[in-house]
Image (cartoon, rainbow, N blue to C red):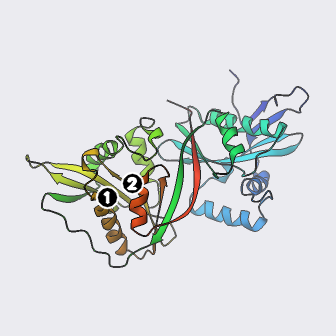
Amino acid sequence: MRSLSNFLRRDAGDSGAAPVHCRLARPEEIHGAMRLILASAGQPAEDGQVHDFLSFARERNIEVNDAWVAEQSGRMAWALLPILSAGRTMLLLVPPTRPTGAGESAAGMLVDAVCAHYTGRNVQLAQVLLDPADNAGERLFLSHGFARMAELIYLHGPVRRAAAAPPLPGSLSWISYSTGTHDLFASAIAASYQDSLDCPGLNGVRSIDDIIAGHKASGEFDPQWWMLLCERDGSGIDVPLGVLLLSRLPRSDTAELVYLGLVPRARGRGLGDALMRQAFANISQMPLQRLSLAVDAGNAPALKLYYRFGLARLGSKIAMMRKIAQ
């Protein structure tokens, strides 16, 4: 097994091609790497766009010094930025244009080198988001151990001011998140995944603790914005029916619907509407203007629910995943 360091040498696959070096970007290369990663319409990003992203990265605690480059014949052939997240995941930011020929080999080597580098470093999953029309990108990542998880549709809509919380029958109530209710939330979230149409390929891939850690890291976590809709049974025990997780996106006027789900026995009872009405009631108490979320394109019931509450489509991405550790 080859040892891993911050400078990795790989053969380009063609005996006549120059060797490819996959390594961490040097400080003086960060700007050029980001121009490549942030490119659009086949053109590198402008300096102003890079500076804007670097400011955004500082605000979101994104470590741009983690950028990697594939160097071939003294030039930067490709680059990517791994963004480490809670819940033992990393998101790879990659250039939108796929190289061809030896450059394509360099891109694949860089993906493999970064995934190998983070193996055993408390990272379990690597993820990448691609434009739906990026067939070349999808082929590249499929050929390097990634699987297509879903097409994610991004929705947003205005907050309904002074929205009223839904009236609940006497047997139903809301429970907020706390250390004391953590296990109840964990079991409810896990139960809501059963026969779910929301990214079913992820079921069983991650532990529930990693899932909750990832949800907490999505935006600004406030336990009062995490709620369970529960029903009291004949023994006086509150049994979860639905999960509603909200957060505030930092330095914005937008709330994110991090997760909404119903356990199997609660589906078909109109409780999704109750969860959405409660979401708008919560957000209307804050100086926020918009609600945003991402949903699996194959989850038709969820899409109907969100459209019914006035959310509109912004765009979509193909989510791909590679498991890099147990």
Mark 1 closeness class: few <14, some 14–19, many ≥20 residues within 10 Å: many
Against 98, residue 142 (above or below) is above
Q: State the residue at coordinates (42%, 44%).
A: 211
* Residue at figure coordinates x 77%, y 61% from the top left: 45
Q: From the image, tell me which residue sits under label 1.
A: 272
Gap in angstroms between the C-alphas marked 2 and 1: 9 Å
Mark 2: give few (<14), some (14-19) or many (20+) Cα within 10 Å: few
- Expressed as whole percent of the image width and height from the top left, the position of residue 240 reads 23, 50
**In the image: residue 278, left or right of residue 299:** left
The correct choice, above or below, for 160 with respect to 42 in the image is: below
Residue 139 placed where, x, y %? 68, 39
Q: Is residue 221 visible?
A: no
Q: Which mark is residue 301?
A: 2
Residue located 64% across and 36% down the image = 142
| SS at mark 1 in the image | helix
Pick the residue in front: 280 or 91. Answer: 280
The local secondary structure at tag 2 comes to: helix
Q: Amino acid at mark 1?
A: Gly
Q: Nearer the viewer, residue 95 or 137?
A: 137
Q: How many numbered markers are drawn?
A: 2
Tell whether label 1 touches label 2 (CB within 8 Å).
yes
Give the position of the N terminus as an image quadrant.
top right
The residue shown at (31%, 62%) is 273
**Place of residue 73 in the rendered image (x, y in percent of width and height, measured from the top left):** 89, 39
Q: Is residue 39 visible?
A: yes
Q: Inspect the image, locate mark 2, and give the three-letter code of the amino acid beneath it.
A: Pro
